[in-house]
Image (cartoon, helix red, strand yellow):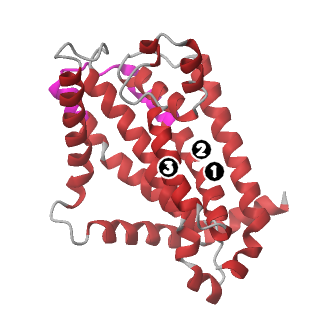
Amino acid sequence: MESVKKHLSDFLKYRYLLYNLISRDFKLKYRRSVLGVAWSVLNPLMMCAVMVIIFGSLLGGRGTGIENFPVYLVIGQLMYTFFRDSTTMAMGSVMANAMLLRKVYIPKYIFPLEKICFGLVNYLFSFVALIIIMLITRTPLHATVFLAIYPIIMMFFFSLGVGLVLSTLVVFFRDVIHLWEVFTTVLMYFSAIFYAPEQFGNLMLETVIKCNPIYWYITSFRTAVLDGKMLTFNMVWICGLCALLMMAFGIWVFRKNQDKFVLYM
């Protein structure tokens, strides 16, 4: 209990630092960009257009077999990109601030937390792309759209747990950076971003895909926004449990090793 109070006190004490770090990263990312924040919207729009054209060509103009494929695709793309980008940034956050950590006391978890928060800010800006595609395709706006907040929040905490683990591992093993790049590429193909698992007619492959937490976050979002349906019980408990377990594991790994960081940085 005392430990929880200490961490909460630290968080409140350094909340302005967290805000300033997010603001700094935001300015640095778009400082020399002509398009600026608009790129967060244009990027998913262009990727969606390219993939719709490619899949349409590969399937001889017959479509993908998925109703409203552009919206289906951009939802999966945005959710996966948030996870990949935020965890990749969090992975090197402690090492990038090694000099600062040697000079002054700052709770080390602030840095991976800031990167995940920054990833979420970018993700929310990219929602404009989803709205544009929904307008173009005349996708109805359902009342269940507000339920999409749940998978977003759960994915944030899941990503934070992964980011804490990665930021710890990379201090001791630099090769994790390269391994994570390969892993996220494989993960993309097992997250049902541009296909439906049922299309393959392979029960074993479908089961493997459904063991991927990212699949459940994407599917839950699609159910609320695209299908206009309530989240199923499986969606609620799987998304919540994965976030809880990953957060608990991430905090445990980070706390167990953070005092050793200075010896390896």
**The quarter of the displayed image where residue 1 is located:** bottom right
Q: Distance between the residues labelled 1 and 2?
A: 5 Å
Q: Nearer the viewer, residue 162 or 201?
A: 201
Label located before the other in sequence (2 or 3): 2
Does residue 97 appear in the picture of this structure?
A: yes
Q: In this view, does 171 lie to the left or right of 228?
A: right
Tell me, yes or no, whether the highlighted magenta stretch contains residue 263.
no
**The quarter of the displayed image where residue 44 is located:** top left
Q: Which of marks 2 and 3 is in front?
A: 3
Neighbourhood count class around disc 1 (C-alpha, 10 Å): few under 14, some 14–19, many 20 upward: many
The location of residue 104, given as percent across then percent down, is 63, 86
Q: Which residue lies furthest to the top in this view?
A: 201
Neighbourhood count class around disc 3 (C-alpha, 10 Å): few under 14, some 14–19, many 20 upward: few
Looking at the rendered structure, the kind of residue marked 2 is Phe
Q: Is the magenta stretch mostly helix, strand or loop?
A: helix
Q: Mark 1 points at which residue?
A: 161
The location of residue 255, given as percent across then percent down, is 76, 63
Q: Name the residue under label 3.
A: 182
Q: Residue at x 27, y 51 (%)?
A: 40
Q: Which residue is drawn at 58% across and 63% down?
A: 175
User: Does the residue at mark 1 contact the one at mark 2 (Cβ under 8 Å)?
Assistant: yes
Looking at the rendered structure, the kind of residue marked 1 is Gly
Q: Is mark 3 on a helix, strand or loop?
A: helix
Q: Is mark 1 on a helix, strand or loop?
A: helix
The location of residue 145, given as percent across then percent down, is 39, 26
Label located before the other in sequence (3 or 1): 1
Looking at the rendered structure, the kind of residue marked 3 is Val
How many numbered markers are drawn?
A: 3
**Magenta part of the chain:** 131-151
Q: What element carries label 2?
A: helix
Q: Mark 2 points at which residue?
A: 158
